C-alpha cells in the first residue's frame, strides 16, 4: 500500500478467482479504512461533511496479477460501483495482456459500460489522478514567475 494525498495505491499479486474475490474486496476496504455500507449511509446524511484527506482515487497495481476469472470480474464490477457511490474512482495499472483480454471479454473494459480507466503503468495512473485532483481543487498548472 502506497499513499499520496487523495490517492491510495494497492499492489496485488497472484490470481483473482471465485475463491479469493471476497477476501480481495474486504482487504481493499480494510486498506481504505472504510465500511461501504456505513459510509454510503453517512454520505446520505444532511450533516455530511467530507474530510480534507478523503481518498478520491484507488489505483490497483495489477502488474503481478496473473489471472482473473469471470466471477471475480463480476464482483469487481459491483465493488467499483459501490466505491463510486462514496466518490472513490478506481484506476487499474499494469494489467498483463492476458488479464486485459479477460476483462475485455467480460465487458469490464472497452465495452459500452467502461467500469474503470486502465493505464500501462502506475506512474501514468498517479499522474492522471493528481491532475484530476488539481482540477477539482481549482489549482492551475500554469507556472507563474514571481519577482521580489
Image: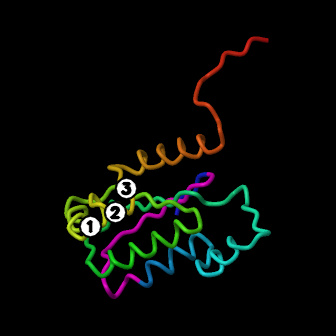
In front here: 2 or 101?
101
Disc 3 element: strand
Name the residue: 30% across, 75% down. 15
Pinpoint residue 54: horizontal percent, then vertical percent.
66, 60
Left or right: 105 as drawn, with respect to 59: left
Residue behind mark 2: 113
Residue 25 lies within the magenta run:
no
> Comparing marks 2 and 3, which lies closer to the viewer?
2
Left or right: 137 as drawn, with respect to 117: right
Pinpoint residue 45: horizontal percent, then vertical percent.
74, 73
Callout 1–callout 2 Cβ contact below 8 Å: yes
Which range of residues does the magenta coloring cover? 5-21
Compared to residue 37, the image places residue 104 above or below, namely: above
Name the residue: 35% across, 51% down. 119
Q: Which mark is residue 107?
A: 1
Residue 6 lies within the magenta run:
yes
Query: Which of the 4 image quarters holds residue 143?
Result: top right
Q: Which mark is residue 93?
A: 3
Amino acid at each position: 500500500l502506497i499513499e499520496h494525498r487523495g490517492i491510495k495505491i494497492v499492489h496485488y499479486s497472484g490470481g483473482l478467482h471465485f475463491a479469493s474475490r471476497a477476501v480481495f474486496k474486504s482487504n481493499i476496504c480494510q486498506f481504505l479504512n472504510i465500511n461501504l455500507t456505513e459510509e454510503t449511509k453517512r454520505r446520505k446524511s444532511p450533516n455530511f461533511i467530507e474530510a480534507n484527506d478523503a481518498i478520491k482515487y484507488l489505483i490497483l497495481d495489477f502488474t503481478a496479477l496473473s489471472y482473473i476469472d469471470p466471477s471475480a470480474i463480476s464482483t469487481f464490477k459491483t465493488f467499483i460501483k459501490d466505491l463510486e457511490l462514496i466518490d472513490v474512482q478506481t484506476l487499474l495499472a499494469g494489467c498483463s495482456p492476458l488479464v486485459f483480454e479477460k476483462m475485455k471479454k467480460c465487458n469490464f473494459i472497452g465495452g459500452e459500460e467502461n467500469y474503470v480507466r486502465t493505464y500501462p503503468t502506475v506512474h501514468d495512473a498517479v499522474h492522471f489522478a493528481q491532475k484530476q485532483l488539481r482540477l477539482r481543487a481549482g489549482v492551475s498548472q500554469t507556472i507563474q514567475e514571481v519577482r521580489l
